[in-house]
């Protein structure tokens, strides 16, 4: 049996009924485009460990990029391990202390404004500024510019860059998005020229040595832009998906209001049921057998995170939103193996603070009955584009 839908076309929503059938009948199969699709939790999690066989790539076949422009998720070992160490140290838990207060202040500031009104578009007016400002705050770039590079990061992920390494304007990030690249290059140059370095992430990136030498300016730019995008395009979907669930389940909203200690469990359940990244794409670089099928070098593979998260063999009642799961963090949403998301603690922290503030200030809310659910126009992402609601706050 081949997959009856195209996993690259998730704009209309994730076809969960079809995925369930696949897990039961054909867990390793081909999409109509010839891409292998892994549907089961065990296969997905095992495959993330095999970096010798699978290399991350959203690029179309034949599109090769210079090493300097490889995204961190694409960099092969051992270079990846060394770049990864710098990223880990920059967003390690002990560096996140001030983030909770930052998000709390920002969320309350946004709520001060929106709770004056009944009609609010939550994605733009509450959700989107939070992850954007946090990643700017950590990197050390001016948080006041968040709307600017939120737009740029949307333009990069919604355009052809990820698949072709170019846009209609030019090749690579520098050519494809000169404004974004120029902004980041200027921030890097400021730190290279500075006699009194500050303690932000960007300064540490500029000063740390990898492979016995410092990252080049193009490597730095690529990494910083990846971080801005990774911190922004995913956590926004998490907060938006959780708010959507809660709008449709007032009894859970009230439960969280009376016991905010349940918020982390609601976050995990949202991550599992509505993963912000629906699947990962890989190039097979060495033949491997999975689930009795041989995947050959040169073929493309999609790791079905959204499917793995509803695997009946791992999660009882997989389609239900439950706060009493024995394995709340057992989902595949942050990937696995050497490329597992280093931002998961940060994403959970931001979402918790934002939700605590929202639950404290908003008595109830409902999505406008006329609203037709719209999705972000990014082929691998899963989250609402807009969320027009009626708020009841005093
Ligand atoms: C809910 C929010 C998030 C989700 C669902 C998410 C998901 C993921 C997934 C699935 C991967 C693995 C990619 C792969 O194997 O190809 C990944 C990698 C990555 N994420 Fe996240 N992410 C989130 C938030 C963040 C944040 C806030 C940051 C922050 C700064 C971040 C930074 C990264 C980086 C740098 C990588 C590449 C790691 C590597 O290749 O070694 N992510 N993320």
Image (tube, rainbow, N blue to C red):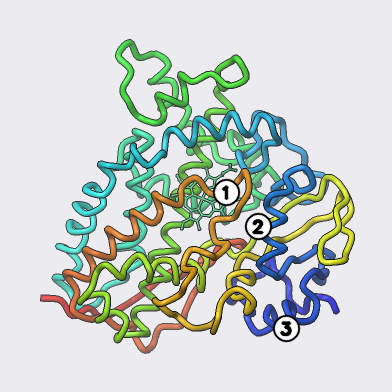
Q: What is the residue that sits farthest to the front in this orientation? A: 326
Q: Would you name the residue on which mark 2 appears?
A: 280
Q: Which mark is residue 370?
A: none
Ligand 1 neighbours mark 1 (CB distance < 8 Å): yes
Q: CA distance from mark 2 to mark 1?
A: 12 Å
Q: Earlier in the sequence, mark 2 or mark 1?
A: 2
Give the residue at x 27% y 58%: 353
Query: What is the secondary structure assignment of the residue under circle 1?
Result: loop
Residue 277: image x %, image y %? 56, 61
Q: Nearer the viewer, residue 21 or 190?
A: 21
Residue that label 3 marks:
21
Dot 2: few (<14), some (14–19), or many (≥20) neighbours within 10 Å? some
Secondary element at tag 2: strand
Taking 302 as reference, is 249 left or right? left
Q: Earlier in the sequence, mark 3 or mark 2?
A: 3
Tell me if residue 372 comes above or below residue 314 in the rendering: below
Query: Circle 1 sits on which residue?
Result: 340
Left/right placement of residue 35 relative to residue 341 reads right
Give the residue at the far left of this rendering: 394
């Amino acid at each position: 049996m081949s997959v009856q839908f195209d996993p690259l076309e998730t704009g209309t929503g994730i076809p969960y009924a079809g995925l369930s059938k696949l897990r039961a009948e054909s867990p390793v199969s081909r999409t109509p485009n010839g891409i292998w699709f892994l549907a089961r939790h065990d296969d997905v999690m095992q495959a993330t460990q095999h970096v010798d066989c699978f290399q991350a790539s959203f690029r179309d076949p034949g599109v090769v990029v210079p090493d300097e422009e490889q995204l961190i998720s694409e960099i092969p070992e051992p270079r990846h391990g060394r770049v990864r160490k710098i990223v880990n140290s920059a967003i390690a838990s002990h560096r996140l202390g001030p983030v909770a207060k930052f998000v709390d202040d920002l969320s309350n500031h946004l709520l001060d404004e929106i709770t004056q009104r009944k009609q609010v578009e939550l994605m733009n007016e509450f959700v989107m500024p939070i992850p954007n400002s946090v990643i700017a705050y950590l990197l050390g770039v001016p948080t006041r510019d968040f709307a600017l590079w939120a737009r740029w990061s949307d333009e990069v992920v919604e355009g052809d860059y990820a698949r072709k390494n170019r846009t209609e304007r030019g090749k690579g990030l520098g050519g494809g998005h000169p404004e974004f690249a120029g902004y980041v290059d200027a921030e890097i140059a400021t730190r290279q020229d500075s006699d009194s370095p500050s303690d932000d992430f960007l300064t540490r990136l500029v000063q740390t040595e990898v492979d016995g030498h410092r990252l080049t300016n193009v490597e730095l730019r690529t990494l910083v832009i990846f971080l801005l995008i990774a911190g922004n395009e995913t956590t926004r979907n998490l907060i938006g998906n959780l708010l959507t669930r809660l709008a449709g389940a007032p009894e859970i909203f009230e439960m969280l209001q009376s016991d905010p200690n349940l918020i982390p469990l609601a976050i995990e359940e949202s991550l599992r049921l509505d993963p912000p990244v629906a699947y990962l794409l890989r190039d097979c670089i060495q033949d491997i057998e999975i689930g009795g099928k041989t995947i050959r070098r040169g073929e493309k593979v999609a790791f079905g995170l959204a499917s793995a998260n509803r695997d009946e063999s791992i999660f009882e009642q997989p389609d239900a939103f439950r706060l009493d799961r024995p394995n709340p963090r057992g989902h595949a949403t942050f990937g696995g193996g050497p490329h597992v998301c280093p931002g998961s603690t940060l994403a959970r922290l931001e979402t918790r603070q934002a939700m605590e503030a929202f639950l404290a200030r908003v008595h109830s809310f409902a999505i406008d009955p006329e609203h037709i659910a719209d999705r972000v126009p990014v082929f691998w992402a899963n989250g609402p584009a807009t969320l027009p609601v009626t708020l009841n706050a005093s």
